Image (cartoon, rainbow, N blue to C red):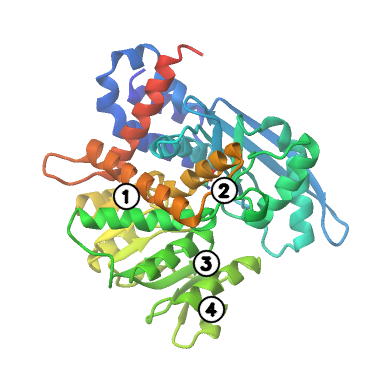
């Protein structure tokens, strides 16, 4: 089938899975011309095989809350593609999680992991469990019940989950504890572990750090320095934290963070103390940023709004998919934005991306910008397999090289005749070619 026929088939079959269709549509559009240059891929029906996950597990998770009530949630693991390595990707605990969310994330992960240059396939999982307002004991019981079902589907050379929204070091700890007990082995089956039990230095910061390294490369193509630039960030979780930390260290000024309740505008910029406070906010499980404005004088809380209305040089979506739409994009452009990079997965709507590309603004997609997170998970897997730990400097140096390589791959495949770098196209083509070649060479399976 040609790319348009594949899309029509998917729309007919999975019409209600909007996010999944959005992610696939973007990739099909980018790779169309390349696909036509490879009749061998066409003959092997590589694209049709690539857009459909290998398999998807759905399971019931039953647990008891602190009041003694029985709670029931749904758990999932999507094993999308393992042509270049074990399935690899995070677990998301969020009430809005559906099969469509996880299929979009698993699909994106396949391309992202290919871009890292490390041998990892794509997968994703999670649950509609809402961590908001849950006690530590409830989080632990939920994670344990989740792993009782998940453990039979994963393994250090089969499928290696990690964190995502709602799943951090604490949750990975509870998940790992139950896996270790059931499987009777201590392996690198999960990444994002804490340092004393197999984790890697830099992993918590890696998504944000990698994102800022990538932004530096983007700016460099226009001879622009990061130092002194203002940055609007959304979110206040792990990703926002890492990005703020590195941006501050490199002399940029982060002026916003946000939550479901609204956003914080801090004109003087986040400093180390304020950045540390993000972790406190996240760990409180309240899912609000308003307390920041009470704690730090001069910071304003703007309820119910997103941070894209502030005047900024750089905008970094660091929260959730489709958090920046066409109107937001037009406002950012009007206010003179230079660079927009998705540190969250599919942070911008297709309409927003079109606006940035039309205006020839530096814009890069999540699968390139946030690949430092999963890349460092890959480095954690390597350290676990070798039974050694690398130093901060070693991990950081590898992360920097990986982000530079991803940027080069985007430039190679995404530069138009007029010199504009279409990072969406570049990332999609580079990821596609790697996975397609591996599938082709491994035959019809
Ligand atoms: O979206 C992502 O790349 C992640 N949540 C991290 C995945 C991983 O396996 O570290």
Front residue of 97 and 184: 184
Query: Judging from the image, what secondary structure is the residue with disc 2 in?
Result: loop
Q: CA distance from mark 2 to mark 1?
A: 32 Å
- Residue 29 as seen in the image, left or right of residue 222: right
Q: Which residue: 58% across, 38% down?
A: 386
Residue ID for mark 2? 389
Front residue of 86 and 15: 86
Query: Judging from the image, what secondary structure is the residue with disc 3 in?
Result: strand
Front residue of 405 and 285: 405
Q: Which residue: 36% across, 30% down?
A: 432
Q: Quadrant of residue 233?
A: bottom left
**Nearer-N-terminus badge (4/2):** 4
Residue ID for mark 4? 292
Q: Is mark 2 within 8 Å of ligand 1?
A: no
**Nearer-N-terminus badge (2/1):** 1
Closer to the eye: label 3 or 4: 4
Which of the labelled discs sits on residue 255, or is there none?
none
Q: Quadrant of residue 98?
A: top right
Residue ID for mark 1? 364
Residue ID for mark 3? 259
């Amino acid at each position: 089938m040609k790319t348009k026929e594949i899309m029509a088939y998917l729309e007919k079959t999975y019409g209600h899975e909007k996010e999944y269709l959005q992610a696939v549509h973007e990739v099909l559009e980018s790779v169309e011309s390349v696909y036509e240059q490879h009749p061998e891929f066409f003959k092997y029906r590589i694209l049709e095989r690539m857009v459909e996950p290998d398999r998807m597990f759905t399971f019931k998770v039953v647990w008891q809350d602190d009041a003694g009530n029985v709670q029931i949630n749904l758990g999932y693991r999507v094993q999308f593609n393992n042509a270049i390595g074990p399935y690899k990707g995070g677990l998301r605990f969020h009430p809005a999680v559906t099969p469509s969310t996880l299929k979009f994330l698993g699909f994106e992960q396949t391309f992202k992991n290919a871009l890292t240059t490390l041998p990892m396939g794509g997968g994703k999982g999670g649950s509609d469990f809402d961590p908001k307002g849950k006690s530590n004991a409830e989080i632990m019981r939920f994670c344990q019940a989740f792993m009782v079902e998940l453990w039979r589907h994963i393994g250090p050379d089969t499928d290696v989950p990690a964190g995502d929204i709602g799943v951090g070091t604490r949750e990975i700890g509870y998940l790992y504890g139950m896996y270790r007990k059931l499987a009777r082995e201590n392996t690198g089956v999960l990444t994002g572990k804490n340092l004393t039990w197999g984790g890697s230095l830099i992993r918590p910061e890696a998504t944000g750090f990698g994102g800022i390294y990538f932004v530096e490369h983007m700016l460099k193509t226009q001879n622009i320095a990061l130092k002194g630039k203002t940055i609007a960030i959304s979110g206040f979780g792990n990703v926002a934290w890492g990005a703020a930390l590195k941006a501050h260290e490199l002399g940029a000024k982060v002026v916003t963070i946000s939550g479901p309740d609204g956003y914080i505008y801090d004109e003087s910029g986040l400093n180390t103390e304020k950045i540390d406070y993000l972790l406190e906010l996240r760990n409180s499980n309240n899912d609000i940023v308003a307390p920041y404005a009470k704690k730090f004088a001069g910071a304003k809380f703007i309820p119910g709004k997103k941070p894209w209305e502030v005047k900024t040089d750089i905008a970094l979506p660091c929260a959730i998919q489709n958090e920046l739409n066409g109107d937001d994009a037009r406002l950012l452009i009007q206010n003179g934005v230079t660079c927009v990079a998705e540190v969250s997965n599919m942070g911008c709507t297709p309409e927003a991306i079109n606006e940035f590309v039309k205006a020839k603004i530096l814009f890069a997609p999540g699968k390139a910008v946030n690949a430092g997170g999963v890349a460092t998970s890959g480095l954690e897997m390597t350290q676990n397999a070798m039974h050694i730990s690398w130093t901060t400097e070693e991990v950081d140096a590898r992360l920097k090289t990986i982000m530079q390589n991803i940027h080069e791959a985007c430039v190679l495949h995404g530069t138009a005749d007029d010199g504009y770098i279409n990072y969406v196209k570049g990332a999609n083509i580079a990821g596609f070619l790697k996975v397609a070649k591996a599938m082709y060479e491994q035959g019809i399976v």
